[in-house]
Image: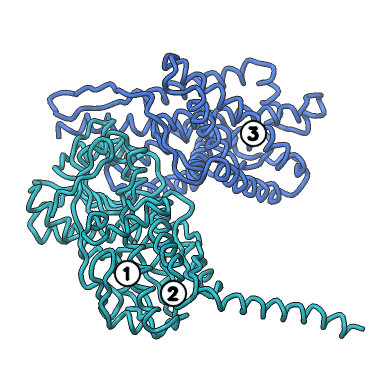
Chain colours: A blue, B cyan
């Protein structure tokens, strides 16, 4: 039994770092839904493109260059964020903007098509095989708790994921709360037609939303690429589904909801794998989603949809 | 007027068809469905290297029965979903022979297609017993052993040489991975070894830290993984990250160079069961020269088995002609001398004997045979 506390701590750490990634990607889903009511199925692919861009940047800089490690990682993050912002903007303009007045289903199909296109776009450009990312961030914090032999290991790469996610979340929250663009975003999320009538450039806000979501996903992509070390053009698919689930769990349309949903989903998966069986971890995660939606159909922090007359 | 307009395209179509059949008469088509995309492309590369080298060597000597061999490369992505479409493409191409599929999950559904169409197909890589046990085919064969040989072979090595007190077995829940893992579990339990954990992980997941931490708490002496190298690579890498230093072991589906790319130095001391190293077999020297001549690598679990598959097909067609039924009968009743040794088939197309061996990896991905 003395092993239980360290094991719990270890799994808690595992769950948090997994949840942090889900949260970063889920933000993109939730922000876009909050503004234009569309589930951007191509968002998982944006995350994957961010990861690939990070790898390409790393190859361009070269491992043997004299740059210190924080600079290299920062360069990867900045380049990936910039490139995916462009992708996010382009995807919106190509696949969604022309369909803004169409029935809900049409942009959804367009999103799925965009997702498939982007997967194969990267597969054609970079090859459909797995690509290895060199292990830049090695080392970990190890500690034991109490009398147990079990060493709790917190790899630096995972710690970085958690820290960067928290920083990004706080930064985004402050931006949305205190800046003019943030205020305009909140206005659009409340009622986009009214916001447009009141003089807010809603097209620009929509593009901005896509770009911010894409940049956060790119940050997640680069960090995961460094932590996991393996990339292929199809990682966006699974990550996208999980992140979408996290966004719905937390309340689609709510940014704190996306964070909460991401962390909850990561913890649920990890603890299910740890204490039940890895075979059932996805079942547990999705059962959790169903359960929460049964009692709170708009998600944990979601606001109930009020039909205004 | 209408009739004339319709006659012209019809005539053109008939003309094109007759041209096509005329062209067919001069080549012997061999379909080669294997993974050309996806995470397990390496096995497709190995099959191509082996089969195409054999085909090139034969074509240089004039082909089989005066016909040049025309290989048709078809992608199955190592995906069960693409299995029947790929097999259908073989059928539609007009090929009556195939060197087919690397992954068991892709082979099992396809066997039904080949059997129904009477296409003689040999798999150089699919090891699951289900491939031949499910419908006991007449037209489907292997040039590789089965997991109910590989599993007990691995288990015996574990029980006799490693003598662990506690073993954990993981698998990827797919046909091949869970099949070989179950075989190992059954054999280990028969040998009296304590299998403390038998669990499946998801293919395509990136983060296995939960199961790694669980293994850390369990403290086994050996972790056996049934599945392919993408998953084992991540398991090894994340195990090392978390300080889990247990010995890992896996079947031939994990043993290729990409494992080194993913896991890095964590592959050190990995044990793998593989087909015996046929590149070192006496009598295969001229085959190695062929590989050098056509600039392909003879390394890899399925390369020489693919070469041998083409040899078996060629020998049979030389004996009885390009009739698939006669070839199938011939294959069931004759012994072939091939790059993997003597090839003898039982009634459902399995090899009567096949050599597996245990190899150990070092930190640079080099393998040394340690048993037998």
Q: Which mark is residue A87?
A: 3
Whether labels 3 and 1 belong to a single chain: the reply is no
Q: How would you rate the neighbour count of disc 3 (Cα within 10 Å): few for under 14, some for 14-19, many for 20 or more? A: many
* Horizontal side, residue B14 vs residue B351: left or right: right
Q: Quadrant of the N terminus of chain A?
A: top left
Q: Is residue A85 above or below residue B234?
A: above
Name the residue tied to disc 1: B142
| Residue B19 visible in the displayed image | yes
Q: Earlier in the sequence, mark 1 or mark 2?
A: 2
- Which of discs 1 and 2 lies nearer the camera? The answer is 2
The residue that appears at 70% across and 42% down in the rendered structure is A95
Which residue is nearer to you in this view: B38 or B17? B17
Which residue is nearer to you in this view: A169 or B200? B200
Name the residue tied to disc 2: B64
Whether labels 2 and 3 belong to a single chain: the reply is no
Chain to which the residue tagged by mark 3 belongs: A
């Amino acid at each position: 039994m003395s092993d239980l506390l360290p094991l719990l701590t270890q799994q808690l750490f595992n769950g948090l770092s997994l949840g942090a990634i889900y949260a970063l990607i889920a933000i993109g889903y939730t922000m876009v839904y909050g503004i234009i009511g569309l589930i951007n199925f191509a968002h998982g692919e944006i995350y994957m493109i961010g990861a690939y861009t990070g790898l390409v940047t790393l190859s361009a800089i070269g491992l043997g260059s004299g740059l210190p490690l924080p600079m290299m990682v920062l360069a990867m993050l900045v380049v990936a964020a910039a490139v995916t912002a462009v992708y996010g903007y382009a995807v919106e303009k190509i696949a969604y903007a022309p369909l803004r007045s169409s029935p809900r289903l049409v942009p959804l199909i367009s999103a799925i098509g965009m997702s498939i296109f982007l997967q194969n776009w990267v597969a054609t450009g970079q090859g459909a095989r797995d690509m290895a990312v060199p292990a830049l961030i090695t080392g970990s914090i190890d500690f034991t708790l109490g009398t147990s032999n079990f060493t709790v290991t917190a790899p630096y790469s995972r710690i970085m994921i958690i820290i960067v996610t928290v920083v990004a979340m706080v930064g985004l929250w402050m931006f949305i709360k205190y800046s003019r663009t943030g205020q305009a975003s909140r206005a659009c999320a409340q009622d986009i037609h009214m916001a447009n009538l009141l003089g807010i450039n809603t097209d620009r806000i929509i593009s901005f939303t896509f770009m911010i979501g894409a940049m956060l996903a790119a940050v997640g992509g680069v960090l995961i690429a460094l932590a996991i070390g393996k990339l292929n053009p199809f990682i966006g698919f699974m990550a996208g589904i999980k992140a979408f689930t996290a966004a719905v769990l937390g309340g689609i349309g709510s940014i704190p909801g996306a964070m909460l949903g991401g962390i909850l989903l990561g913890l649920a998966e990890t603890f299910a794998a740890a204490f039940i069986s890895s075979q059932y971890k996805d079942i547990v995660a999705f059962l959790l989603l169903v359960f929460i939606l049964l009692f709170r159909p708009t998600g944990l922090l979601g606001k109930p949809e009020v039909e205004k007359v | 007027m209408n009739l004339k307009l319709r006659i012209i395209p019809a005539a053109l179509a008939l003309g094109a068809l007759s041209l096509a059949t005329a062209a067919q008469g001069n080549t012997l088509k061999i379909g080669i469905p294997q993974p050309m995309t996806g995470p397990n492309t390496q096995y497709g590369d190995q099959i191509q290297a082996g089969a195409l080298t054999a085909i090139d060597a034969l074509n240089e000597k004039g082909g089989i029965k005066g016909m040049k061999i025309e290989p048709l490369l078809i992608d199955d992505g190592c995906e069960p979903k693409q299995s029947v479409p790929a097999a259908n493409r073989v059928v539609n191409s007009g090929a009556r022979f195939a060197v087919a599929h690397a992954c068991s999950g892709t082979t099992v559904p396809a066997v039904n297609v080949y059997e129904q169409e009477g296409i003689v197909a040999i798999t150089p890589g699919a090891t699951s017993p289900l491939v031949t046990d499910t419908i006991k085919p007449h037209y489907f064969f292997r040039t590789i052993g089965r997991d109910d040989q590989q599993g007990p072979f691995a288990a015996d090595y574990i029980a006799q040489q490693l003598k662990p007190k506690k073993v954990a077995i993981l698998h990827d829940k797919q046909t091949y991975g869970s099949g070989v893992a179950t075989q190992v579990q059954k054999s280990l339990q028969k040998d009296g070894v304590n299998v403390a954990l038998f669990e499946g992980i998801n293919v395509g997941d990136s983060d296995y830290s939960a199961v790694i931490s669980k293994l850390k708490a369990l403290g086994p002496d050996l972790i056996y993984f049934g599945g392919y190298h993408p998953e084992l690579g991540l398991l090894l890498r994340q195990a090392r990250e978390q300080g889990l230093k247990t010995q890992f072991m896996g079947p031939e589906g994990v043993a290729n160079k990409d494992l080194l790319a993913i896991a890095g130095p964590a592959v050190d001391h990995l044990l793998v069961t593989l087909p015996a190293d046929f590149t070192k077999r006496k009598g295969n020297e001229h085959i190695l020269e062929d590989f050098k001549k056509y600039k392909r690598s003879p390394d890899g679990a399925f390369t020489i088995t693919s070469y041998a598959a083409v040899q078996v097909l060629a020998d049979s067609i030389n004996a009885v002609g390009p009739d698939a039924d006669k070839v199938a009968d011939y294959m069931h009743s004759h012994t072939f001398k091939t790059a993997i040794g003597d090839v003898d088939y039982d009634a459902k197309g399995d090899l009567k004997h096949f050599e597996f061996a245990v190899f150990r990896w070092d930190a640079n991905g080099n393998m040394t045979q340690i048993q037998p």
